[in-house]
Image: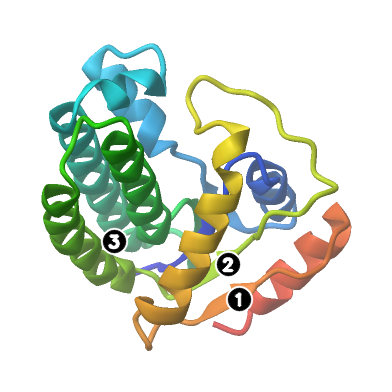
């Protein structure tokens, strides 16, 4: 059974670049993009469809969590490699669900009480699913990274919210048996090196 390591962080922060660097260093990488896969299955061209109603958001995020969990169990079951690094974790999924929920409440499409009730159960499930990882790399937002717009990801204006919610998840909801390594260096090479070295300790 493979050890599974997740990579978390806000949109546009350099996760793909880091994944590619670690792949080049010999780490097996699963670059499956669950949000894009679910959008494809639903026939959506962008994430704007998520915000049509609470029902579309909940249906989308429930499917994202389910598809991601099945994928991670498949990764863990692999016997051809010792370690697999995967993009996004259930901390990210919980965070983006909170983002969409509060956007819907601010737009008057969803009552605050109903949103909180849904989020309480959903985030709890994400916390349980987070136990699938041997460890998590957290790549925080850094001001020197230029954001690139993409219809399949949240917009630049949401980066601060996502960053704070990820921090909160790792501080309060992260399972104790799953360590989190916060990447602190700025250069691509340094990020690759410190991430690679930490993965080897698991």
Q: Which residue is mark 1?
A: 181
Rendered image: mark on residue 137: 2
> Could you say which quadrant of the image residue 63 lies in?
top left
Rendered image: mark on residue 77: 3
Label 3 or label 1, whichever comes before in sequence order:
3
Label 2 or label 3, whichever comes before in sequence order:
3
| Residue 84 visible, this angle | no
Q: Are marks 2 and 1 in contact (CB under 8 Å)?
A: yes
Question: How far apart, in angstroms, are the residues tagged by discs 3 and 1?
Answer: 24 Å
Seen at 34% across and 76% down, the residue is 173
Q: Position of residue 166 (x, y in %)?
A: 49, 62
Q: Position of residue 30 (x, y in %)?
A: 48, 46
Question: How far apart, in angstroms, are the residues tagged by discs 2 and 3?
Answer: 21 Å
Seen at 20% across and 67% down, the residue is 124
Question: How far apart, in angstroms, are the residues tagged by discs 2 and 1?
Answer: 5 Å
Rendered image: mark on residue 43: none
- Closer to viewer: mark 3 or mark 1: 1
Q: Position of residue 70 (x, y in %)?
A: 22, 49
Tell whether 193 sits left or right of 61: right
């Amino acid at each position: 059974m493979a050890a599974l390591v997740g990579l978390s962080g806000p949109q546009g922060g350099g996760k793909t670049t880091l994944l590619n660097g670690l792949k080049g260093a010999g780490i097996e990488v699963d670059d499956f993009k669950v949000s894009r896969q679910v959008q494809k299955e639903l026939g959506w061209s962008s994430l704007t469809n998520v915000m049509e109603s609470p029902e579309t958001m909940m249906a989308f995020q429930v499917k994202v969590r389910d598809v991601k969990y099945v994928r991670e169990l498949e990764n863990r079951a692999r016997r051809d490699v010792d370690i697999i690094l995967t993009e996004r974790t259930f901390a990210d999924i919980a965070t983006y669900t909170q983002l969409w929920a509060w956007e819907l409440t601010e737009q008057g499409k969803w009552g605050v009480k109903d949103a909180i009730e849904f989020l309480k159960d959903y985030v709890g499930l994400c916390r349980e699913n987070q136990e699938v990882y041997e460890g998590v790399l957290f790549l925080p937002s850094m001001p020197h990274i230029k954001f690139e717009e993409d219809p399949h990801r949240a917009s630049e204006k949401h980066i601060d919210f996502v960053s704070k919610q990820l921090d909160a998840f790792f501080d309060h909801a992260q399972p104790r048996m799953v360590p989190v390594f916060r990447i602190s260096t700025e250069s691509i090479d340094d990020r690759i090196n410190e991430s690679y070295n930490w993965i080897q300790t698991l």
